[in-house]
Image (spheres, helix red, strand yellow):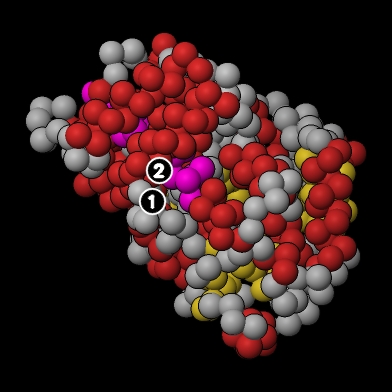
Amino acid sequence: MRVDEGKAYSNIVIDRALEGSGLDNRDKAFATALFYGVLERRVTLDWVIGRYSKLSIGKMSPAVRALLREAVYQIACMDGIPASAAVNEAVELTRAMGQKNAAGFVNGVLRSFLRDGGAIELPQEGKDRAGRLSLAYSVPRPLVKLWENQYGRAELELLLKAMGEHPPLYIRVNSLKTTAQELLERWHEAGIEARQVEGVPFCLAVAHSGAVEKFPGFAEGLFHVQDLSSQLCAAALQAGPGMRVLDVCAAPGGKSFTLAQWMENKGSLLAGDLYPAKIKRIEEGAARLGVCCLCAGVRDAALYSPETGSFDRVLCDAPCSGLGIIRRKPEIRYKPLEELKGLPALQYKILETSAKYVKDGGALVYSTCTLNRHENDYLTERFLKEHPEFQPDPLPEWITALAGKEQGWQMTLFPQDCGSDGFYMARFCKSGRRGENRGED
């Protein structure tokens, strides 16, 4: 209910709830699976409930709606849960949550579902392909249509399927302190199942994570958590020792930490973000990892500060809709698309501001963790048209090859490509050539 009604972040809600729950590890695992499962399958669950309820989902109280979703999910999608227990618990919780008058309604809906077999049987494929895919993969129909229109039918179902799978946990090994092989050996001795990601330096994939803070080497700063796509983005900037580098939207700091490691802790790395609490988190992470070339500070990425100077490399990882990470934060899929329409204007402003910091001969990388062309390639192609002093610059070939793409200056990563989050990156170089009528320095 906190996620659905209060628009809170799922990972923060579940972590705080479990922290004070007093549950043992087994029950915590069950609660987590139920919590995320209901969030991920909400579209499908609501369709099922709607078949057995005379009252529409939208007219139910938040508590009743949540309890029906949880019960149907337990009955249809979880092994080892007696159907009668799921029904009885839902009815008891209806009373406990002050919804006593709805107890009979909840019982009736769930009993009707059980009489039909208690299984989710989707309608046969008909003319409404988007509607069928929405139910099958529990992605709202408007988002299904958006992806179909932007990326095509061939990519669509692969994308929807991948977005419903459990994502790997990726780790960036701190190359300032250790090697991937040394860390793997320590983890294997501790019974942690992990592997090196082929072709990606210092990247490990962990099968079953648990609390990473308890992994061997965490307190020593031997690694930090960072998705594969984010690691590739940092590598695409090609920052090196002695360079002056700017990360304009740095929080929570993962890309900055990886950039510092590519720089071998030599040079100057400026990391900015809008919120002081996030800057503190970056500073704490840098201290744990032993990163000393990084200076973090509060700054608005949309406002240009000439006194900051120019940089060899600038990373503009813009705030975005997050449609590429719904495997990790399932509630993002339910954002009304109308709420996202203002983002490209902000992103473009931040990209233009970031470009002002790039020195002649320097490079700029723009990136997002979303799959929406209005925030990605439509935006960067506009940037190239309006800024002739910048040219498209090929991404490193090993990065594009890893995702099975042809080498080019921009790339969209889908989860089905190489197991990463959905992601976009584009690389530009500044030649110093100015537009004839731009009138800029």
Circles 1 and 2 in contact, beta carbons < 8 Å: yes
Q: Residue at x 31, y 34 (%)?
A: 44
Q: Position of residue 149 (x, y in %)?
A: 28, 32
Question: How many numbered circles are shown?
Answer: 2
Residue at which label 2 appears? 85
Tell me the SS state at disc 2: helix
Q: Position of residue 141 (x, y in %)?
A: 31, 28
Q: Is residue 371 left or right of residue 6?
A: left
Q: Is residue 398 above or below residue 35?
A: below
The part of the chain drawn in magenta is 33-51
Q: Quadrant of the C terminus?
A: top right
Foreground mark, 1 or 2, reads: 2
Tell me the chief SS of the magenta region.
helix
State which quadrant residue 137 falls in: top left
Residue type at mark 1 is: Ile
Q: Position of residue 30 (x, y in %)?
A: 51, 53
State which quadrant residue 436 falls in: top right
The dot on residue 81 is 1
Residue type at mark 2 is: Ala
- Most foreground residue, 132 or 282: 132
Residue 365 visible somewhere in the drawing: yes
CA separation in Å, label 1 and label 2: 7 Å
